[in-house]
Amino acid sequence: MYRTFSILLLLLTVMLFCVPVTDFDEANQFYEKGEYGKAAALYEKIISGGFENGETYYNLGNSYYKLGNIAHSIVNYERALKLLPDDADLIENLRTARLSLTDKIEEHDADPFFTIYSNIRNSFNIYTSKSIFLILILITGIMISLYIFLKNTISGRFVFYTSILSVLALIFFSYMYYDIYSMNGRRYGVVAEDKISVMSSPDENLNSKELFFLHLGTKAEITRSNELWLEIRLDEEKKGWVKKDCLIEI
């Protein structure tokens, strides 16, 4: 009896302390050992299995960067950025990856107020902004209900001003959630070849003109698409059509 109990206790100890190594742990170990190809393959396997999060995309981006695959590193950094919008290391790594690009997209100075708003917006992703938006709806509803019952009391004034603040916060977060939702709904792609031609129309006949070139790793917004072509836009002046297989969609 004592021997059986000892064996069971030993098995329980092994189960508690011998934590199985997951694919993510194994991929991290490959990365730490400098086996970046194996690490990237495992991170890709994790993502293709439906387990997507910012950290996995970030690590995959790092693996591709170490392999010298700038296009795929930028794609995965951008995917990670949607889920980890205020991660300082991620932002810095993406900036570093872009330094090697041929195409330098000019960034215009933003209005100071818009810059402040952008910094606040970039502190949230689609999930956190939605959660705060729903919580504020609940809080605003509760505060308005309390004011209806307490408006003729001493506490009514405090509830009234609190209700105004909650309504203003709800309006702000409603707009911000819509803005983040709209941004997430936009399609972007990264150039996957050393050099591609941007055409005036989605065909290669004599009526289509070559407008300009784009190079490896450049990010562009996808505005329209068909079976073979994508219409892309860099700004109001630079837009046109490229072959679908020339871009990796973010």
Image: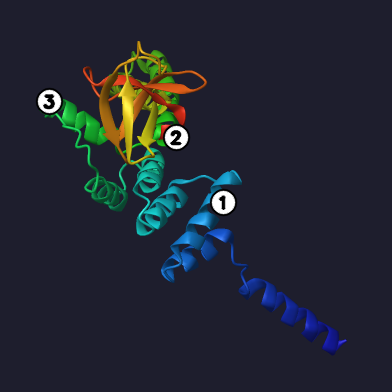
Q: Which residue is mark 3?
A: 111
Nearest to the eye among marks 1 and 3: give it. 1
Measure how far apart labels 1 and 3 are at the Cα level.
41 Å
Residue at left offset 30%, top offset 39%: 123
| Kind of residue indicated by mark 1 | Ile
Q: Where does the image place residue 63, in percent across and percent down from the top left?
A: 41, 57
Q: Which residue is mark 1?
A: 46
Residue at left offset 42%, top offset 24%: 185
| Placement of 125 over or under 176, stated as above or below | below
Q: Are marks 2 and 3 in contact (CB under 8 Å)?
A: no
- Residue 127 shows which numbered tag? 2
Residue that sits furthest to the front in the current view: 206
Residue at left offset 81%, top offset 83%: 5
Residue 224 or residue 8, whichever sits in front = 224
Residue 111 or residue 146, whichever sits in front = 111
Measure how far apart labels 2 and 1 are at the Cα level.
21 Å
| Kind of residue indicated by mark 2 | Tyr
Quarter residue 122 falls in: top left
Residue at left offset 20%, top offset 33%: 105
Q: Are marks 2 and 1 in contact (CB under 8 Å)?
A: no
Q: Is residue 198 visible?
A: yes
In this rendering, position of residue 170 left or right of residue 235: right
Considering the image in quadrants, where does the C terminus appear? top left
Density class for disc 3 (Cα within 10 Å; few <14, some 14-19, many ≥20) is: few
